[in-house]
Amino acid sequence: MDLKLHHINLATENVERLDRFYRDVLGLSEESGGLPTLEKKKGYAGDVAFRTDGAIQMHLAQKDIHAGFNSGQFVNPVSRGHIAYRTSDLDGFKKHLEDHGIPYADWGNQAVAGWSQIFFYDPDGNVIEVHQVDE
């Protein structure tokens, strides 16, 4: 099973302020490559800024406590934020979760065009995303 840390998502009431902090205080640059195409008409229409340290992306997303309801999903990745891993075998990873009795919300490409995403909770309630880039 191949998992690689891809991004950290922080949910905020003020994307511009958080973006300025990560740019000015931590010196992260604006991410320009490999950005997701957001599907703004499928349940989440918030603003998102993208920063990077050159290896890992930061997705600074407008907090939306209703995104799960609006998308028909029981896991909301933008109520508190999440960490995200990329895999080349999402179906295999879903089976791995099922074998461990871990429920997940299958967002498909509902939030990001070209990415199939699932979200689930760790034992402390932190949201984890695993996604695969669609071919």
Image (cartoon, rainbow, N blue to C red):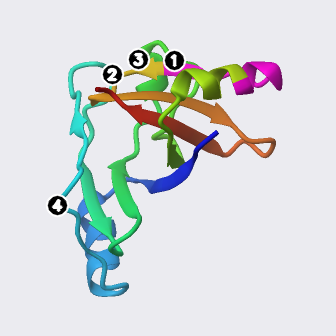
In the shown orientation, is residue 52 left or right of residue 64? left
In three-dimensional space, the C-alpha distance between marks 2 and 4, rounded to whole angstroms, equals 25 Å
Name the N-terminal-most of marks 2 and 3. 2
Answer above or below: position of 46 versus 94: below
Q: What residue is rendered at 30% in x and 85% in y?
A: 27
Magenta span: 96-106
Report crowding for label 2: few under 14, some 14 to 19, many 20 or more residues within 10 A (C-alpha). Answer: some
What's the residue type where badge 4 is placed? Answer: Ser
Q: Is residue 33 magenta?
A: no
Determine whether the residue tagged by mark 3 lies in a helix, strand or loop: helix
Q: Is residue 104 magenta?
A: yes
Name the N-terminal-most of marks 4 and 3. 4
Report crowding for label 1: few under 14, some 14 to 19, many 20 or more residues within 10 A (C-alpha). Answer: some
What's the residue type where badge 3 is placed? Answer: Ser
Say whether marks 2 and 1 touch (CB < 8 Å): yes
Mark drawn on residue 32:
4
Please name the residue that numbered disc 3 is placed on.
71
Say whether marks 1 and 3 touch (CB < 8 Å): yes
Determine whether the residue tagged by mark 4 lies in a helix, strand or loop: loop
Report crowding for label 4: few under 14, some 14 to 19, many 20 or more residues within 10 A (C-alpha). Answer: few
Report crowding for label 3: few under 14, some 14 to 19, many 20 or more residues within 10 A (C-alpha). Answer: some
